[in-house]
């Protein structure tokens, strides 16, 4: 799948099973490696609000959902940066068969942010996920500090702490750039929040 074409489109409530399938596969892979980025599985009510808002995207290849991400236009975890100049990527996940797709989806998200007239792509992950933190910095994202937030739905249900420390990252994009800087080595991780 790395070099295969994909069709990216906005997901809706009818796509909830496809979104959950991608997220659950990525979550299972993370858990199998001892990474507690996400819960072991996602409940529909955790993703439906963003589906209903038209903020969740699905990548399709050969009739199969192979990747997903949510692009929001505000994020409470960045309340100290309220400048209305960013898009916030959450729940980036790809199927294991779609290696390399994650960075392409981040490129797509960056293009959407530029098209909206904004200049930053922002995202975060649990601080303990060192592999994902290194992945983001390798793609050119700049660390923007760590904060403690109330754990996401699911993290609390699987025995996680009520508070979670996250690392925030930011990538500047502009109309003059072709997209975020990315690695060409095919490095890929299971998912991001």
Image (spheres, grey):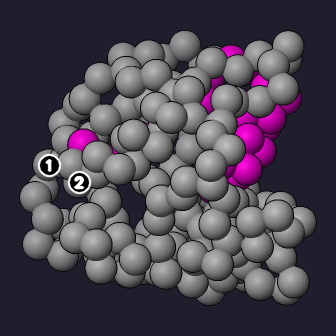
Q: Position of residue 173 (x, y in %)?
A: 70, 21
Regarding mark 2 in the picture, which secondary structure is present there?
loop
User: Residue at 83% of width from left, 76% of height from top?
Assistant: 61
Which numbered dot is residue 163?
1
The vertical placement of 111 against 43, above or below, is above
Query: Which corner quadrant holds the N terminus?
Result: bottom right
Picture coordinates of residue 190, whole percent (x, y): 47, 65
Residue at 43 percent of width and 53 percent of height = 193
Magenta residues (range): 102-127
Instruction: Provide the secondary structure element on which disc 1 rests.
Output: strand
The residue lying at 85 percent from left, 86 percent from top is: 63
| Residue closest to the eye, 187 or 157 | 187
Question: What residue did someone put label 2 on?
Answer: 151
Q: Is residue 158 above or below residue 149?
A: below
Query: Does the magenta run of residues contain 121?
Result: yes
Quarter residue 60 falls in: bottom right
Q: Report the front residue among 104 and 57.
A: 104
Q: Which mark is residue 125?
A: none
Answer with left or right where residue 123 lies relative to residue 163.
right
Q: Is residue 190 magenta?
A: no
| Residue drawn at the location 28% of the way across and 51% of the way down | 129
Q: Does label 1 or label 2 sit earlier along the sequence?
A: 2
């Amino acid at each position: 799948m790395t070099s295969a074409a994909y069709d990216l489109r906005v997901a809706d409530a009818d796509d909830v099973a496809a979104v959950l399938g991608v997220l659950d596969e990525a979550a299972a892979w993370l858990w199998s490696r001892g990474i507690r980025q996400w819960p072991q599985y996602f409940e529909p009510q955790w993703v439906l609000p963003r589906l209903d808002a038209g903020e969740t995207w699905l990548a399709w290849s050969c009739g199969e959902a192979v990747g997903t991400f949510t692009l929001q236009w505000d994020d409470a975890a960045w309340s100290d940066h309220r400048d209305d100049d960013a898009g916030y990527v959450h729940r980036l996940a790809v199927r294991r068969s779609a290696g390399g797709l994650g960075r392409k989806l981040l490129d797509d998200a960056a293009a959407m942010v530029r098209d909206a007239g904004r200049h930053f792509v922002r995202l975060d992950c649990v601080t303990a996920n060192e592999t994902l933190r290194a992945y983001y910095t390798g793609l050119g994202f700049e660390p923007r500090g760590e904060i403690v937030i109330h754990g996401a739905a699911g993290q609390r249900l699987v025995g996680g702490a009520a508070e979670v420390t996250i690392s925030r990252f930011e990538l500047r994009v502009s109309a003059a750039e072709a997209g975020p800087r990315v690695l060409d080595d095919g490095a890929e991780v299971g998912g991001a929040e």
